[in-house]
Image (cartoon, rainbow, N blue to C red):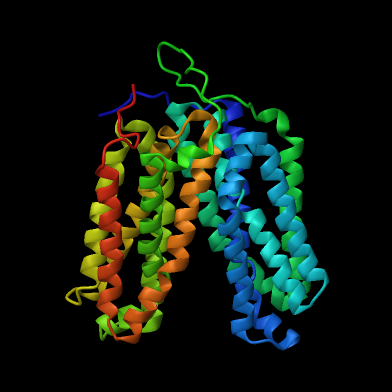
Amino acid sequence: MTSGVRIALEPRERAVIGLIGSVHLVSHFYHLVLPPLFIFIQPELGVSYTELGIAMTLYFIATAIVQVPIGLMVDRIGARAVLIGGLMLMGFSLVLAGMVPNYTVLLVSFFIAGMGNAVFHPADFSILSNNVRESHQGRAFAFHTFGGSIGYAAAPVVMVPLGSIFGWEFSLTLAGLLGVLMGFLIFICGSVFQNRVAQEDGKTGVSKNLPEKADWRIMLTRPMILFFCFYVLTSAAGTGLTAFSIPALPIVYNNISPEIAGAILTCFLVAAIFGSLPGGWLADWVRMEYIVVVVCFAVMSLCVLLMGSGYLTLWLVFLMASIAGLMRGLYNASRDILVRRASPSRSVGTAFGFVTLGYTLGQGGTPVLYGWLMDQGLGSGVFLVAAGFAFLAMLIVLIPGQGQKPKS
């Protein structure tokens, strides 16, 4: 069952993981940098919340449009240069939005920032894959996920006090400078990154064969199409839980108020954060990572299904949400290793750009379905559909040819 990997990371590997984890923190911080400021922006600019929501819609539309081309660019010109460019683009876009308080400028700025947002997954995973030994990549990917989760959690905690004390313009400008500074840091620390294919550190110490040239046609291969579908389904399942569990749970359970439902969702999200780092060690420890993904999705599907049954006590709902969240965190690193292993070594950026597009589409396409279920008063349907999406994602992982072969 185990791969017998060595525990210690080299100092250079630690530096790379720390830098890329910090970059991912900034990227996810930017995902939620604007919504906490809506309450300050709306009266000053005289626009509706719907109009402010358009800025976030444009942000993710821009990401989806350029996601695949950015992945190809990562493999063609190098991940570090693309990563620096994305950080600078996002940072200066937010600085512009803060320094020119105008609704049109806000829309343009966040559309441009959305294009910068597309660099992170292709560039991050390309850098980690080329700088961390394969036997340690589970931990590398786990720290990457952990950084993003902290960024999500930090945004409202930081931006609301900043907005109330200094105003939304200064807050956006300051947030933008964070991206610019991170871009400079990646530029200055360039010597840490090695542009090489990560090697196993097994007993033989033999390097892998040189990889083939980056090629957009890998997106048409069976493993990549299946992983694309997998990401669509996992995103669709997660969207149901994170975006609709608060209004759905009070429909399913008479003794659950929106406030309690919010606490249940918080348990789910916090458990996912706590599960992400152990998931990295687990991915490095097991020989067949796909088993981790399958087990996690099987348990998560069951927990979500039970949450929507209407037959659980309040504390069992909390327990099921926590277990589901823990499973969500545990599987991430194993999933990322499977995608990396199924990718040609010089097309890691293209591969992750492509599958991340699937995640974006799942995130953007399913709220209409969940919203329709809520309009029909089918709170249980939200959990049933989310569990169904998770179960289908598990079945996709069981299809052969997606990097399921055990570690050597």
Q: Is residue 264 above or below residue 351?
A: below
Residue occupying the point 35% across, 81% down = 372
Q: Residue furthest right?
A: 99
Q: Residue 257's x, y, as percent?
A: 35, 84
Q: Residue 50's x, y, as percent?
A: 59, 83
> On the rendered structure, is 122 left or right of 312?
right
Q: Which image quarter: residue 6?
A: top left
Q: Which image quarter: residue 336?
A: top left
Please identify the quadrant where the C terminus is shown: top left
Residue occupying the point 70% across, 50% down = 87
Residue occupying the point 39% across, 79% down = 371
> On the rendered structure, is 196 left or right of 294?
right
> On the rendered structure, is 372 left or right of 351?
left
- Look at the image and tell me whether residue 278 can be seen: no
Q: Residue 352's x, y, as percent?
A: 50, 44
Count of marks overlaid on the render: 0
Relative to the observer, which residue lies in front, 398 or 167?
Answer: 398
Please identify the quadrant where the N terminus is shown: top left
- Look at the image and tell me whether residue 121 can be seen: yes
> On the rendered structure, is 294 left or right of 14?
left
Q: Residue furthest left?
A: 311
Residue occupying the point 69% across, 81% down = 40
Relative to the observer, which residue lies in front, 65 or 308?
Answer: 65
Relative to the observer, which residue lies in front, 241 or 155?
Answer: 241
Q: Which image quarter: residue 320?
A: bottom left
